[in-house]
Amino acid sequence: MSAYSRLMDAVYLLCMTIAAVALMLMVAVIPVGIFARYVLNDALSWPEPVAIVCMIIFTFIGAPVGFRAGTHICVSMVTDRLPPRGQKSAALLCDLLMLAACLVIFQASYALCEAMWFQPQASLPMVTFGQMYLPIPVGALLTILFVIERLLCGDQSGRPLVSLGGTH
């Protein structure tokens, strides 16, 4: 195993932890808002934006985990019927397309964060829209790192550490 893969193992576990904490926080915050609105008859302004921020975090920081673990949506009806050389070529093409897509997402989301960095949210004024959208370019960058790892070191989804984040 290369030094790059060992570094990506640490990044992978960090992403998984951040995504899990964000998901648990979102699951805890939503009932607070519901309880305050319907039981206390006093709607709080902060649960919904906090839940949205958590959803953005677990989506865009958790996506690289799913990519590395190989649990993303995959339609392989055609590629499964290709000869081994064709399957390798198709996998390389997919990785290159993923790299290109992540570069576009990174560039666009970075520009969005930069443009919205000082725009405060009305319901959560201590967090700006630029900060709220920051997980998008970070997630794209992390996915780029995992795509590079796959290109250099091959598929990592069969390794015991990586299958922690997978369902197979």
Image (spheres, helix red, strand yellow):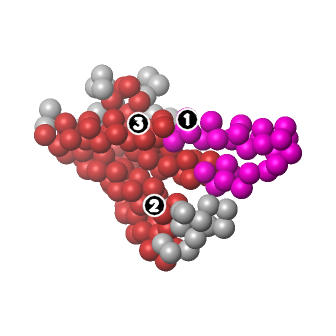
Q: Which residue lies at the image location 55% right of the left edge and 35% below the top edge? A: 24
* Prevailing secondary structure of the magenta residues: helix
**Residue that badge 2 annotates:** 134
Q: Which of the two residues, 160 or 22, is positioned nearer the viewer here?
A: 22
Compute the Cα span from label 2 to label 3.
17 Å
Residue farthest along the bottom direction in this orientation: 115
Q: In screen coordinates, is 142 left or right of 105? A: left
The location of residue 117, given as percent across then percent down, is 48, 72
Query: Closer to us: mark 2 or mark 1?
Result: 1
Q: Is residue 83 above or below residue 141?
A: above
Q: Which residue is mark 1?
A: 24
Q: Residue at x 64, y 41 (%)?
A: 29
Q: Residue at x 30, y 22 (%)?
A: 160
Q: Quadrant of residue 27?
A: top right
Q: Look at label 2 and name its amino acid.
A: Leu
Quadrant location of the C terminus?
top left
Residue found at x 46% / y 40%: 19
Q: Quick one: label 2 or label 1, which is nearer the N terminus?
A: 1
The image shows residue 33 at horizontal and vertical percentages of: 73, 44
The N terminus - image quarter: top left
Visible residue check, residue 76: no
Bin the neighbour count of mark 3 within 10 Å (Cα to Cα): few under 14, some 14-19, many 20 and up: some
Residue segment shown in magenta? 22-50
Q: Position of residue 44 (x, y in %)?
A: 74, 51
* Vertical arrangement, residue 15 with respect to residue 140, above or below: above
Rate crowding at label 1 as few (under 14), some (14 to 19) or many (20 or more) other CA atoms within 10 Å: few
Do labels 2 and 3 touch, CB within 8 Å?
no
Residue 17 shows which numbered tag?
3
Residue type pointed to by label 1:
Met
Residue 141 falls inside the magenta stretch: no
